[in-house]
Image (cartoon, helix red, strand yellow):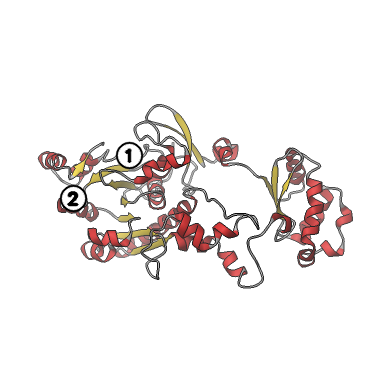
């Protein structure tokens, strides 16, 4: 397969766990970088994340959730609590272009891997970190999974729910995944500066910052008269809403240019009688939103989802079937663009996983390998660092490094 790998020749040291940090490393690996996943002997706790979602999570067989965020990397297991292990890590950083971590700042300081310490030793190195709430403020040191830092504090958990119901039970790793894109983009931008000046920089991303950016439109609008949570029974506008079809399936329509497309929608349903003054403009219909939604609900309920799709497609009205997560793996649109990939697990079975969203030059998948086992490539990496066979054996015997646990 032919694919562009703009980061080929770039070495990344990936000291991350769970999803946001590992996801950034996976993106960089897919873009061609040599990403070395550094783990303690017990491994990244994200290796067990799939168990929370009733997915198989057995490294030597199949671990699809973990593979989604860690494939295409090499595995290095080193004991960073031992001075000899830290010395090995220091040598690894000296030869790297990028260091990313999702460890909390306090833990990095204890290891001497915080930005201030590392940048003095290795001024060339780009140092990137993702944390929960940012580097400053009263909760900067709090643990920050996306459920608390991304969903809860930003308002998304409460305000995206249907009004007068409970808060959303958020999808695991939803906020992490979007944050990983920002970290990957940030360190990639820093590479440009590094190429020009030879110097690294500090790249800072937090789950809370990502969430605020994601809900930025609502942050602005709620300072005026916009209120959340909303309800589909009285939505922002009747033509930016979900409707149930005759067969029980749902569809979402999006009309932003109201004055242009509302008459078209009326024609689709043969309801030109709705072309009256109180529904004629964006501002006018706001006073009658609930009323018009009730009328449109009855029109959508006359047709199956397939029929509605055909009608709206012919009218060039933006719409989409409301689907389930399970539908994505077999969606022909996702498959046609290689947004998903059928991988072969270590036990020979196959399953489909999501792929990095940004590609360069072609849609071909840059698939090198499954997520590494703990320390899978430790010996190979030690040799690349210049250690001899005898030294490597001593480190293995002392469990300073571990191979293929």
- Side of 128 where 320 appears, left or right: right
Residue 3: x percent and y percent? 44, 42
Assign the C terminus to one quadrant of the image: top left
Name of the residue lying farthest toward the bottom: 224
Name of the residue lying farthest toward the top: 348
Residue 323: x percent and y percent? 62, 42
- Side of 202 where 161 appears, left or right: right
- The mark tally for this picture is 2
Residue 372 tag number: 1
Residue 94 placement: quadrant: bottom left
Whole-number angstrom distance, CA of label 1 to CA of label 2: 20 Å
Q: Earlier in the sequence, mark 1 or mark 2?
A: 2
Residue shown at the point (50%, 59%) measured from the top left = 152
Check the image and report above or below for 251 versus 193: above
Name of the residue lying farthest toward the right: 273
Residue 218 placement: quadrant: bottom right
Residue 70: x percent and y percent? 38, 43
Check the image and report above or below for 330 versus 259: above
Q: Secondary structure at mark 1?
A: loop
- Tell me if I can see residue 125 in this picture: no
Assign the N terminus to one quadrant of the image: top left
Residue shown at the point (19%, 53%) measured from the top left = 86
- Tell me if I can see residue 114 in this picture: yes
- Count residues near mark 1 (Cα–Cα under 10 Å), then give few for <14, some for 14-19, many for 20+: many
Residue 85 tag number: 2
- Count residues near mark 2 (Cα–Cα under 10 Å), then give few for <14, some for 14-19, many for 20+: some
Q: Secondary structure at mark 2?
A: helix
* Closer to the camera in the image, 17 or 115: 17
Check the image and report above or below for 232 versus 387: below
């Amino acid at each position: 397969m032919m694919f562009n790998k703009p980061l080929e020749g770039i070495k990344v040291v990936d000291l991350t766990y769970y999803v946001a940090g590992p996801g950034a490393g996976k993106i960089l690996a897919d873009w061609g970088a040599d990403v070395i996943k550094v783990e303690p002997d017990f491994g990244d706790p994200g290796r067990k994340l799939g168990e929370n979602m009733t997915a198989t999570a057995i490294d030597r067989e199949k671990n699809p959730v973990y593979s989604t965020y860690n494939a295409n990397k090499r595995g290095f297991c080193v004991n960073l609590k031992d001075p000899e292990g830290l010395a090995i890590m220091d040598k690894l950083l000296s030869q790297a272009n990028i260091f990313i971590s999702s460890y909390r700042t306090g833990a990095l300081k204890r290891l001497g891997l915080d930005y201030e310490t590392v940048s003095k030793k290795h001024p060339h190195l780009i140092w990137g970190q993702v944390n929960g709430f940012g580097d400053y403020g009263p909760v900067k040191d709090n643990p920050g999974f996306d459920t608390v830092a991304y969903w809860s504090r930003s308002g998304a958990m409460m305000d995206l729910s249907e009004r007068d119901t409970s808060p959303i039970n958020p999808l695991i790793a939803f906020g992490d995944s979007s944050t990983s894109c920002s970290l990957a983009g940030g360190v990639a931008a820093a590479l440009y500066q590094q190429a020009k000046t030879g110097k690294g920089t500090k790249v800072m991303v937090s789950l809370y910052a990502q969430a605020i950016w994601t809900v930025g439109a609502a942050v602005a609008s709620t300072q005026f008269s916009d209120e959340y949570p909303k309800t589909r029974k009285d939505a922002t506008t009747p033509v930016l809403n979900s409707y149930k079809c005759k067969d029980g399936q749902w569809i979402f329509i999006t009309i932003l240019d109201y004055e242009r497309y509302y008459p078209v929608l009326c024609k689709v349903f043969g309801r030109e009688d709705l072309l009256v003054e109180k529904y004629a403009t964006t501002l006018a219909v706001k006073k009658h939103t609930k009323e018009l939604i009730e009328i449109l609900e009855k029109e959508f309920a006359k047709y199956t989802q397939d029929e509605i799709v055909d009608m709206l497609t012919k009218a060039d009205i933006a719409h989409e079937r409301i689907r389930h997560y399970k539908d994505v793996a077999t969606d022909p649109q996702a498959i046609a663009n290689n947004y998903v990939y059928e991988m072969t697990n270590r036990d020979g079975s196959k399953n489909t996983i999501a792929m990095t969203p940004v590609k360069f030059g072609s849609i071909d998948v840059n698939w090198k390998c499954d997520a590494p086992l703990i320390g899978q490539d430790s010996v190979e990496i030690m040799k690349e660092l210049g250690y001899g066979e005898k030294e490597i054996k001593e480190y293995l015997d002392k469990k300073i490094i571990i191979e293929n646990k």
